[in-house]
Image (spheres, rainbow, N blue to C red):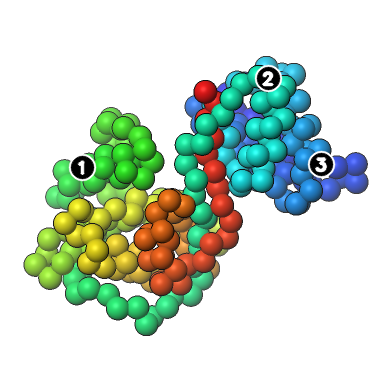
Amino acid sequence: MDLIFGRIDDEQENTKLIFANVKPYNLLIYNLDNDTLDAIKSLADYIIKDGIDLKGINANKKICDEFIDYYGYKTKCAFKEYLAMDVMAITELNNDVILPKGNFRVATWEDKKLLIDWHIKFAKEALKKEISYEEFKDKLNARIENNSIYIFEDEKHRPMAMIASTRQLVNGVSVSLVYSSKEARGKGYGLAIVYNLSKEYLGRGNKFCSLFVDKKNPISNGVYKKIGYNILEDNYDYRII
């Protein structure tokens, strides 16, 4: 099956976890209870029994460890950590941060060549993935068309960083594609673009903005905390090898 959504309930019909497996992506698991081992075993047994193909798993560390131990024991397959992320969110801006001078603006079609270059570099640096323009052109075009991708310029109107609002949620917005050019790093432009986008979308009535940050990048983690972002939980990406 190419698309599966489901949940695991206990004997009292309390939902322990929910899951989704959509090809070609990883199995997603989110726990609603800390006591999850029996639910994890039930999910793994169901996947094995129905012959459902897995690429990997995305979940918090506890869920990943429990699933990998049991599923790996049952199937004799091995997993490798691909990404370790923190899920961060902001509900109120810290207005005391010092920002570099410049201009926050919506990206236009004139920026497209630069945005293509930055998308490819972002994927390589942040996601450890080589991508081609063909893989993201539709999303990029839609974001330019919908005014959901932004640029921060320095005082000379030179683009220094980009960011995008990637998903509108019920009460908030998901943020991604935070990228600063190499010559702009260490000068506060990453801080400035995340601050300005967060201010923009909280000002539109969203209750929060959320993003993922690499656990191995404490600099970015610290930048977001300065603005007012806090870690909600971790999220790991393991792939079957």
Q: Is residue 154 above or below residue 216?
A: below
Specify which label sits upstream in the sequence, 1 or 3. 3
Using the image as rendered, state which of residue 170 and residue 24 is in the foreground: 24
Compute the Cα span from label 3 to label 2: 24 Å
Specify which label sits upstream in the sequence, 1 or 2. 2
Judging by the rendered image, the residue that carries numbered circle 3 is 9
Judging by the rendered image, the residue that carries numbered circle 2 is 75
Q: Can residue 146 be seen in this snapshot? A: no
Disc number placed over residue 117 in the picture, else none: 1
Give coordinates of residue 209: x percent, y percent. 47, 62
Q: Please give left or right for residue 196 compared with residue 228 in the image.
A: left
Q: Can residue 100 be seen in this snapshot? A: yes
Give coordinates of residue 155: x percent, y percent. 12, 70
**Most distant residue in the right direction:** 12
Disc number placed over residue 105 in the picture, else none: none
Q: Quadrant of residue 93?
A: bottom left
Q: Amino acid at mark 2?
A: Thr
Residue drawn at (32%, 66%), measured in percent from left and top? Answer: 191
Q: Amino acid at mark 3?
A: Asp
Q: Please give left or right for residue 13 compared with residue 43 in the image.
A: right
Q: Amino acid at mark 1?
A: Asp
- In the structure shown, which secondary structural element does the residue marked by tag 2 occupy? helix
Q: Please give left or right for residue 76 compared with residue 145 in the image.
A: right
Q: Quadrant of residue 101?
A: bottom left
Using the image as rendered, state which of residue 40 and residue 139 is in the foreground: 40
